[in-house]
Image: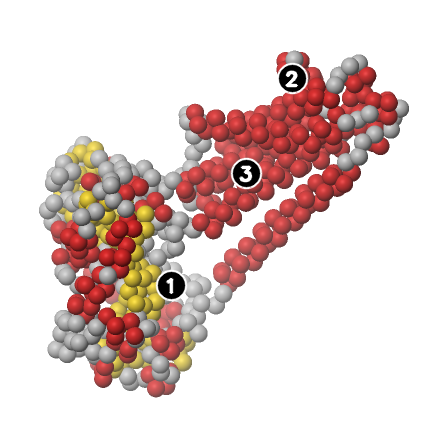
């Protein structure tokens, strides 16, 4: 019987080629869009699941409010690695990262540098923590000694080749020598380490051994033993404020207590987050790679569902619109003895056949659109044709889709009354007008919703691109990695200024947009040990041409001037900083602040500075 239904369905589809094309192609577009979105969502939900024991790995986060600044950090102090391991029996291994940004790399004796976008210091427990195997080298010793470095396969092939890399010498940023002690496979694209190609031994980072609980620079991961629960260490971890941080602060603020710290409106809360949840959590300060959020996953899921439902509704509307052409066929078949269930199965087979044809077209469309989709989403997604589960899911989805999209037309046409349809009054032989009208309204409502959503997103992006940021960004070209020129950086700048199309040039350690700049805590001259007067600010170094080049406008004060020798100890701050200082632009001028709040002895030789104000965050 099924073979007969299939044969009749195929003949019916061939008899109406234009109708068949509209139905199959419309359904295929919806399926292709939903398929691409589903692959994107799957990629997002499986971030970092490839690491061994990923379900037992957690990172320590820090929520800090101090100096008028509240932030959520993905980094913690250097001693955070030893404290949990010593305090908690539940922890099996701890690993820290300290990112170093990009680096210019060349093998010893070579003259040309190759830029590696992301590098990081890492503890020697790195391989044990994440279950990463080396293609070459010994995991027990690869990161033991200072100036040892492990490379990814791609990075090794740039310089030596995988098999020849071990024992070779690398020069980083034209000054630091490293010896290659290991090569690992390239990290997966859906991993928090996806952008990192060089892993330097933490033993070569002297700061990692300094017990300073006031400086947050290290991503700290720990792995629980199999029988442990992360909830068991939640409360003790929060107690680190009183156990470790406050005693460290007392070295330069004698007498300060945890109660006084909190009474001043400050807080410091250490918490944990599972490794597999990091990518879909908030973008905290100093993340190792950019994160997404669950809200975008929910939105994309709804869009995928809307696309499929919209395609199905379109299928239903087209099928019911063609019902009159099939009315006499139904009447004749009922007259000859076909019952309602046989007709329903016939029409469901037809919708199923269209769904399978649409699946083939959807796969073709997805393959053609995937490169453009990857560029748009900044992904490296591929269709898993060799994965049997992929085909099982597609098969199940197509069957459900065929049943869903063909159910209403099947039941609608199977209700035709033979006498009426044979007399030519098929459109009045059954009801269903309200349902058809509802489907049309629903289809248009979803279409309008998606169009409006697209316009809103477009206007938001346009607003972001055209918003006045408080400085001139048009016609400003950024040249990275000039620091590698060392003492010749100023000469490079002057030569650039001599170019006929260059109006001005400046050197800066950072650009005035969000980045991973470190915070510094400033205190006024009269309150070096007063936590309530402390102000936490991000800082970066600039030269005398920075303000005119970037087009900043002053609210009060003036720019740095080479004719004033004491300008070497001066800073310029923005209006937001002035508000946090509880001053006005006029009264802030000449105030003296020290950035040595976290030094061992802040009264020994404070680097006092005076302030001038310009607009950055009006």
Q: Nearer the viewer, residue 82 or 455?
A: 82
Secondary structure under tag 2 reads: helix
Residue under label 2, please give it.
Answer: 6
Cα–Cα span, label 1 and label 3: 35 Å
Residue under label 3, please give it.
Answer: 33
Residue under label 1, please give it.
Answer: 513
* Residue appearing at x 43%, y 39% in the figure: 42
Q: Residues within 10 Å of mark 3 (few under 14, many from 20)?
A: some
* Residue appearing at x 43%, y 30% in the figure: 384
Q: Position of residue 609 (x, y in %)?
A: 24, 79
Q: Nearer the viewer, residue 190 or 410?
A: 410
Q: Is residue 161 visible?
A: no
Upstream in the sequence, badge 2 or badge 1? 2
Q: Position of residue 299 (x, y in %)?
A: 52, 48
Label 3 near label 1: C-beta < 8 Å? Answer: no
Q: Nearer the viewer, residue 241 or 453?
A: 241
């Amino acid at each position: 019987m099924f073979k007969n239904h299939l044969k009749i369905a195929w003949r019916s589809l061939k008899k109406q080629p234009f109708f068949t094309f509209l139905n199959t192609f419309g359904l295929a577009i919806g399926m292709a869009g939903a398929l691409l979105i589903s692959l994107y969502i799957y990629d997002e939900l499986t971030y970092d699941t490839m690491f061994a024991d990923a379900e037992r790995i957690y990172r320590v986060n820090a929520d800090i409010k101090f100096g008028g600044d509240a932030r959520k950090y993905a980094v913690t102090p250097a001693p955070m690695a030893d404290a949990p391991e010593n305090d908690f029996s539940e922890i099996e291994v701890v690993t820290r990262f300290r990112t170093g940004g990009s680096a210019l790399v060349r093998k010893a004796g070579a003259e040309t540098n190759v830029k590696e976008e992301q590098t990081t210091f890492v503890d020697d427990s790195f391989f044990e923590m994440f279950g990463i195997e080396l293609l070459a080298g010994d995991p027990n010793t690869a990161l033991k000694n200072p100036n040892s470095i492990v490379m990814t396969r791609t990075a090794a092939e740039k310089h030596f080749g995988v098999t020849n890399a071990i024992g070779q010498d690398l020069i980083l940023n034209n000054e630091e020598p490293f010896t290659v002690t290991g090569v690992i496979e390239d990290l997966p694209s859906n991993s928090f380490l996806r952008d990192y190609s060089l892993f330097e031994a933490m033993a070569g980072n002297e700061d990692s051994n300094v017990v300073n609980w006031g400086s947050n620079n290290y991503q700290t991961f720990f792995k629980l033993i199999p029988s442990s629960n992360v909830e068991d260490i939640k409360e003790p971890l929060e107690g680190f404020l009183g156990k470790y941080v406050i005693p460290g602060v007392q070295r330069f603020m004698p007498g300060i207590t945890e109660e006084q710290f909190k009474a001043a409106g400050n807080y410091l809360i250490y918490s944990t987050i599972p490794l597999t949840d990091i990518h879909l959590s908030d973008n905290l300060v100093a993340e190792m790679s950019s994160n997404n959020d669950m809200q975008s996953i929910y939105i994309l899921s709804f869009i995928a569902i809307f696309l499929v439902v919209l395609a199905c509704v379109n299928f239903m509307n087209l099928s019911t619109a063609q019902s009159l052409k099939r009315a006499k066929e139904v009447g004749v078949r009922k007259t000859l003895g076909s019952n309602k269930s046989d007709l329903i199965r016939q029409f469901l087979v037809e919708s199923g056949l269209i769904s399978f044809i649409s699946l083939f077209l959807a796969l073709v469309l997805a393959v053609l659109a995937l490169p453009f989709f990857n560029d748009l989403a900044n992904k490296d997604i591929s269709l898993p044709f060799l994965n049997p589960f992929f085909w099982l899911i597609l098969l199940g989805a197509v069957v459900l889709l065929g049943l869903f999209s063909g159910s209403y037309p099947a039941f609608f046409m199977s209700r035709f009354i033979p006498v009426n349809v044979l007399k030519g009054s098929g459109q009045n032989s059954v009801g269903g007008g309200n349902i058809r009208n509802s489907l049309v309204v629903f289809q248009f409502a979803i279409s309008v919703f998606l169009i409006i959503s697209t316009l809103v997103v477009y206007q938001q992006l346009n607003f972001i691109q055209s918003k006045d940021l408080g400085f001139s960004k048009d016609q400003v070209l950024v040249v990275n990695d000039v620091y590698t020129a060392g003492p010749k950086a100023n000469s490079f700048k002057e030569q650039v200024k001599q170019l006929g199309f260059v109006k001005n040039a400046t050197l800066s350690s950072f650009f005035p947009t969000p980045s991973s700049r470190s915070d510094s805590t400033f205190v006024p001259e009269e309150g070096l040990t007063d936590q309530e007067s402390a102000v936490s600010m991000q800082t970066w170094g600039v030269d005398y041409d920075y303000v005119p080049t970037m087009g900043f406008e002053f609210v009060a004060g003036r720019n740095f001037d080479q004719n004033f020798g004491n300008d070497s100890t001066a800073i310029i701050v923005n209006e937001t900083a002035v508000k946090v200082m509880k001053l006005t632009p006029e009264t802030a001028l000449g105030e003296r602040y020290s950035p040595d709040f976290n030094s061992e002895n802040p009264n020994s030789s404070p680097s006092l500075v005076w302030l001038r104000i310009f607009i950055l965050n009006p």
